[in-house]
Amino acid sequence: MKPASFKYLSPDSLDDALAATAQHGAEAKLIAGGQSLIPAMNFRVLQPAVLVDLNPLTELNYILPGGDGGMRIGAMTRLRQLERDPLAAVRAPLLHAALPHIAHVQIRNRGTLGGSLVHADPAAELPVVTLALAARYRVQSAAGSRWIDSSTFFNGFFDTAIEPDEIMVEIALPPMAARTGCAFLEVTRRHGDYAMAGVAALVTLDESGVCQRARLVYLNLGDAPLDAQAAAGLLIGEKQSDELTVAVAAKAAEEEIMPMGSVHASINYQQHLARVLTCRALNQAFVRADEWRMTNDES
Amino acid sequence: MSNNSHTVTVTINDSTYEREVEARLLLSDFIRHELRLTGTHVGCEHGVCGACTVLLDGQAVRACLMFAVQANGRQITTVEWLAASQDRLHPLQAAFREAHGLQCGFCTPGILMTLLTFLEENPHPSEQEIRATLSGNLCRCTGYQHIVDAVESYVKRKA
């Protein structure tokens, strides 16, 4: 199992990298952490003619507070760095909760945030989490840069709105609204495996504990991160109750998710997991939002 | 040399090596075939088994998920670095021997390199933390119990 031959380019600057993508277009592949790309090349599923290495671009490796209270993260930031970043733990607890689920330490030492998003594996955690957080992605080409909203980025299996001559450079996470609670849960056969199902849940309450905003995004239950808007919509204007979370979970599991089944989990089992995980994640998210309300509103 | 050939200079276990390599050469094959450091093992070649784990600038990585050209100018540590000599094992290796933490030994180099950084960062791990760390390395002989025992005895002795 050896990769096919390719021409290797290792640009020193983003401008040089953009010149390379402008010149080679779709025949070039960008390599970030390479933790999904190199296996695909070893299997010869992918045989790019040109490989443009983004690893020398240390200017794309940063974790910064956003002026709006959110965060700005460079696309080449390693997952392990994010996992250990104290700012990310406070400002992006959903992201922070999801990171340890991603493969293993050895993989997270190399893997990058931008790389995972652009790869767009429907079973991956980071597309789901950043979509749930309403992130925006900045992509750049030799012609200029543009922002893509996470809600319009993922088209389907390994397919995104990014063009072959563009490079993802930054991920912007908006601030967490007051009285917001989140949870990330997934079920795997073994720690670090791709999950059979997973969910990111976010709820935002008003002063009296009534849900104002909610988000439920699933992994590996569709051909892209699956945003269950109808199920989440049932939460709006309601206070938490067991009946409510059960109804929301049923709506998501029966009407919205599109599990495909695999040797690891049948479609029925994936539906079952979606139902159970939704209830658990919503309960956790409500508890955390309530904790926020107790500590901040009443002090 | 064709334009697919690149000069790679790496420091491995305190020795510096320079070689001309094809861009597609994996770091794992570079270490084994070009440098003849065969302590690093190659199992699955797609990042699942962990046998090829080495330290890149002190961090555990899969050598089969990097190209050798990408290691240019970097510092790599392999399992050969652990033992001071043939008959003086590293304390972690000694703990593995005593606790029967290996049978065929194929996965052992990757497990040792993974544990090295883990135990540096986390000198008093719980059994659960040890098992979570080992999840990135496949062992088909031991059932992991003796590996966990080895790590626990190493930790106890170090305290």
Image (cartoon, coloured by chain):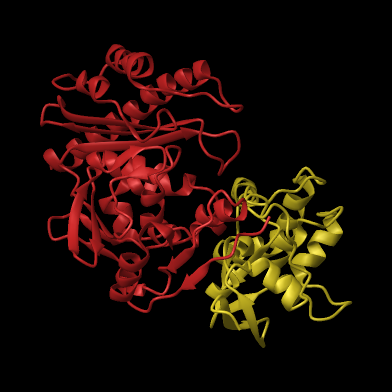
Chain colours: A red, B yellow
Whether residue A247 sits left or right of residue A6 in the image: it is: left
Pick the quarter of the image with the C terminus of chain A: top left
Whether residue A99 sits left or right of residue A151 in the image: it is: right
Identified at 80% across, 60% down, the residue is B96
> Residue A228: horizontal and vertical position, in percent?
29, 25
Identified at 44% across, 75% down, the residue is A10
Q: Is residue A291 in view from this perspective?
A: no
Whether residue A207 sits left or right of residue A166 in the image: it is: left
> Residue B49: horizontal and vertical position, in percent?
68, 51
User: A106 above or below A122?
Assistant: below
- The number of numbered badges drawn on the structure is 0
* Quarter holding residue B86: bottom right
User: A233 above or below A284?
Assistant: above
The residue positioned farthest toward the right in the image shown = B87
> Residue A137: horizontal and vertical position, in percent?
24, 53
Identified at 47% across, 65% down, the residue is A51
User: A38 above or below A209?
Assistant: below
User: A171 above or below A189?
Assistant: below
Residue closest to the eye, B77 or B120? B77
Q: Is residue A282 in view from this perspective?
A: yes
Identified at 60% across, 47% down, the residue is B132
